[in-house]
Image: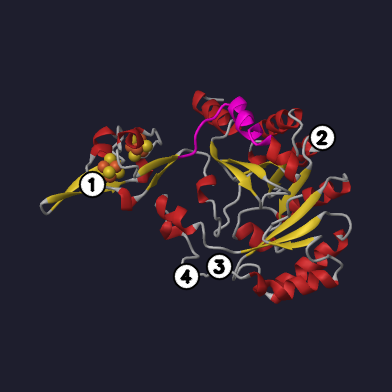
Amino acid sequence: MSTEERKIEKEISEPLISNIQRYSLQDGPGFRTTIFVKGCPLRCPWCHNPDTQSTKTEISFYSEKCTGCGRCAERCPTGATYTEVKGKGIILKFDRSKCTGCGKCVDACLSGARDVAGRKMPIKEIIREATADAMFFFNSGGGVTISGGDPMLFPEYTLELAKLLKKEGLHVALETSAFGQWQHLEQLLKYIDLFLIDIKTLDPEKCKDVIKGDLDVILTNFENLVEAGAAVRARLPIIPGFNNSQSDYAAYTAYLSQFVGKIDAVDLLPFHSYGEKKYQLLGRMESYQFQDVHSMEPKELKPLIIMLIEAGFVSGQSLTVGGLIGVN
Ligand code: SF4
Ligand code: SF4
């Protein structure tokens, strides 16, 4: 293995942290602190956290705060940020293909127009932040959720993090697409109290062609977790034009009906457009296909809700909309 390959492997085995969100109510029961690792093996076109897809540092650019002073361009060592003369003034240009994510432009900017998406964070610091709200966790039945991106892209790191969180006596949930190796999920069984498994489609072709995953792997892992007696919630992001047809709903109902009483719940997550701003900040609006798609109202999911209730799931208990599980 070359030095460069070793460097890349090390970077991937120790992910950047995209965000640590406190007081979250939608990533498991009670008040939670959610740790978002940066990096995902899938490429869902509707992803509302595009800043967590790449494993690398990226620069968010808030154009509305930029005064055009040019300090960032002066500090940029690669020429990714540069200025061009236009008329009597200059305009700022950003060639992201040349950006190494060094962050020098962020330090140079006095207007807060630039920010780093993804930072290195020692695991001890993560544990310290995660335990800061322990009292809220215990009073609300909450805990910590490891999310992303997808933590299963970093199996050794995720195992270590889960062990340390468990050592602190916390309830630990893992949100994942389950697109990884079973042996890695199996190792986590002892340390994860709740698995939140995203099942984005039941169509193997769409899974392969649109989101770049392997449905067999995902469903086998899901079924193995249930078989192993783990607490599992199936999370279904419902996306207009992708998986919200009558036949998609029939496929979900037929598949999930065999797990009534065996999984904790099905959480329906209607599409929302809150992620759009992040695509703008990361300069990726051209690749975002949902610009004109409205956020779905929970009532739009009524046909699927009725089908799942008829299959045996109980609204408000083993069937929720929005992922709000509740606070004790
Ligand atoms: S992060 Fe570094 S390489 Fe990228 S634009 Fe800023 S200064 Fe240039
Ligand atoms: S330093 Fe900040 S305010 Fe100045 S041009 Fe760069 S991004 Fe804009």
Q: Nearer the viewer, mark 4 or mark 1?
A: 1
* Nearer to us in this view, 169 or 211: 169
**Sequence-wise first label, 4 or 1:** 1
- Indicate if the residue with disc 4 has its beta carbon within 8 Å of ligand 2: no
The disc labelled 2 sits on which kind of residue?
Answer: Lys
Q: Is residue 304 magenta?
A: no
Q: Tag on residue 68?
A: 1
What is the secondary structure assignment of the residue under circle 4? loop
Return the residue found at the far top.
3
Residue name at image x 73 percent, y 51 percent: 327
Q: In the picture provided, is 65 more to the left or to the right than 168?
A: left
Residue designated by label 3: 295
Q: Is mark 2 within 8 Å of ligand 1?
A: no
Give the image location of residue 221, x and y in percent.
Answer: 78, 48
Where residue 36 sits: x, y (%)?
59, 42
Q: Quadrant of the N terminus?
A: top right
C-alpha gap between disc 4 and disc 3: 10 Å
